[in-house]
Image: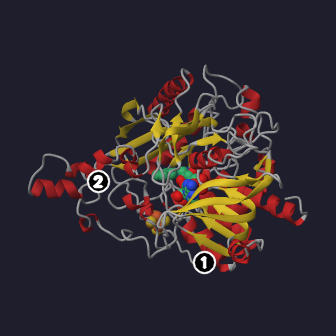
Amino acid sequence: MNLNITSNKSRTYDAIVVGSGISGGWAAKELCEAGLKTLVLERGREVKHIEDYPTAMYNPWDMPHHGRIPLAEQEKDPIVKRCYAYDEATSHFFVKDHEHPYVQEKPFDWIRGYQVGGKSLIWARQTQRWSDFEFEGPARDGFAVDWPIRYKDLAPWYSKVEKFVGISGNKDGIDSLPDGEFLPPWELNCLEKHIQQRVKQSYLDRQVIIGRCAHLTQPKEIHLKQGRGQCQARHLCYRGCPYGGYFSSNSSTLPWAAKTGNLTLRPHSVVHSIIYDEKKQKASGVRIIDTQTKEMTEFYAKIIFVNAACLNTNLILLNSTSNRFPNGLGNDNGILGKYVAFHNYRGAGGGTYEGFDKEYYLGRRPTTAFMPSFRNLRKQEADFLRGYMVAFSAYRTGWNRNIHSDAFGSDFKRESTEVGPWGVFIMMQGETVPQEQNHVRLSTEHKDAWGIPQLITSVGYNEPNDTKMVQDFHHQASEILEKSGIKDIFMYDTKQSPGLDIHEMGGVRMGKDPKTSMLNAHNQLHHCKNVFVTDGAAMTSVGNQNPSLTFMALTARAVNFAVSELKKKNL
Ligand SMILES: Cc1cc2nc3c(=O)[nH]c(=O)nc-3n(C[C@H](O)[C@H](O)[C@H](O)COP(=O)(O)OP(=O)(O)OC[C@H]3O[C@@H](n4cnc5c(N)ncnc54)[C@H](O)[C@@H]3O)c2cc1C
Ligand code: SF4
């Protein structure tokens, strides 16, 4: 018995964080800085900053397939191959479909990164604040439930996160895309500036800005203290950046947490479920399966942060059953797993531009131009709900394009060294409306390699709303390009499945009323107060902005609350 007590003690911490990705890294940093002995449980392998980025400095000819994924592997993993960032230099940071199957009741491309750092290694680093146009969206338009917080509740936490992460951007003074704590912005190129001018002349409600992104354009002391340096504009980020030029958990929050001496990071630990103590009426810890020994072990803590990324967080809570919670932890109202939403990326297009022949640009800028949402913003003006952000970039065709031409010998050489005309690519990032039928649940038939039920995804477009939004984007984007003098304009519907946006959110939504939501205004489970969910699962609606900055701000805010509740002995 004594031995057991000692053993339990050695597995007891002040706090447990499930997942070491973008949000889990923030939970770890904040908890450790607050003095809590914190255990981070990560299902994947360790990825150490710099030393575990094997391909970071590769040239195309250093790789057997010059960066491409061989056909046989593409056939084996048909889902992940659809992700634009998945290639020979980055594939080791992506989950292979055949190793981690799930059940698609409706087509859903679930793109995952199972390793220390999660998807923070492979994200595209675009970071925009939400505004009250998003927080007030559900109440205004009558969908989902009202958010229990507003922009003012999150604004100081956005600032805190931005200063530490390092966000480059311009103070544009746009109320639907609030300014943040910015490092110097990247620059629009000449054609993008031209489009910016034309948009300004043609529309009162639209602005073109340079993308705000998690890149150190001019590191400050806080970034140098993290051991990170200036971004070199190489845009090879998805391989891991040895300069620490972009934000990842691996380069930033996790080493920072480790420096406090309060962090224990345990890779190879798949969290199976959260343990509910019926007597104490709170969670006492988690069960994990060690992927190397296959053994199940329990770890204990006063508070638990679940940051396994949206769908895995849903899975863990659904799998956390007890006498008190037979349908999943905190799931008295039966909405756990429901109201999953995502971003509508189906609209895309482009064109070419005659002119600026002598104009070039330097380096590979790791962001694009954006137009903050302008549709249905101040009033309902279209026959679909909500709006979309527009992203576009202008580039010189040539270097790549000519290599694929029919030219041969000296013609081929000449063509390969000459730049072609300017091209423009434009795309949408639209808000979808959470629907009860868009849900995930556990399979009763299929289990994963560790005996955990597989997830069933039943998430689809909300028609006709989502298609109408695509059509509107096509119309508006064509008009914008036309007014900017762009020729050969084309528009298309990618028809991609939900999930490929990699912005899945919901299932454990926040709300004011325990009858209709899972979490309160502090991301605390209404019915199990010492469990916090601060990743995308917590989102009541999805806005049109890239979401990760909001996950980080929600996390920092929730940790602050949890620590103060602990001090007051409320948890
Ligand atoms: C190609 C690409 C481009 C993107 N671009 C952007 C962008 O520009 N802007 C933006 O805001 N977002 C972007 N995203 C999305 C962004 O990566 C996610 O929103 C973000 O990483 C979510 O953070 P998270 O902490 O919830 O999850 P993750 O970063 O995925 O971390 C979750 C962690 O939990 C671990 N885990 C899962 N299940 C368990 C378990 N049972 N037990 C233990 N550990 C577990 C995982 O292994 C992982 O390490 C992009 C993603 C990709 C792949
Ligand atoms: S663009 Fe910047 S962040 Fe990306 S790999 Fe290059 S130096 Fe690193």
Instruction: Evaluate whether residue 126 shows in this view.
Output: no
Q: Nearer the viewer, residue 112 or 491?
A: 112
Name the residue at 46% across, 48% down.
Answer: 111
Q: Identify the disc placed on residue 224.
A: 1
Looking at the image, in which quadrant does ligand 1 appear?
A: bottom right
Q: How many marks?
A: 2
Q: Secondary structure at mark 2?
A: loop
Q: Position of residue 246 (x, y in %)?
A: 53, 65
Residue type at tag 2: Ile
Query: Which tag, 2 or 1, sits closer to the chain's start?
Result: 2
Q: Identify the disc placed on residue 346.
A: none
Q: Secondary structure at mark 1?
A: helix
- Label 2 vs label 1: CA separation? 36 Å
Q: Are marks 2 and 1 in contact (CB under 8 Å)?
A: no
Name the residue at 43% across, 54% down.
Answer: 95
From what the image shows, is residue 14 above or below residue 66? below
Q: Position of residue 474 (x, y in %)?
A: 47, 28
Q: Assign the N terminus to one quadrant of the image.
A: bottom right
Q: Where is mark 2, residue-wise?
A: 69
Instruction: Evaluate whether residue 224 shows in this view.
Output: yes
Q: Position of residue 307 (x, y in %)?
A: 63, 55
Q: Position of residue 302 (x, y in %)?
A: 78, 63
- Dot 1 surroundings within 10 Å: few (below 14), some, or many (20 or more)? few
Residue 247 in which image quadrant: bottom right
Q: Is residue 109 left or right of residue 4?
A: left
Q: Nearer the viewer, residue 556 or 422?
A: 556
Residue at the far left in the pictured view:
409
Residue 267 in which image quadrant: bottom right
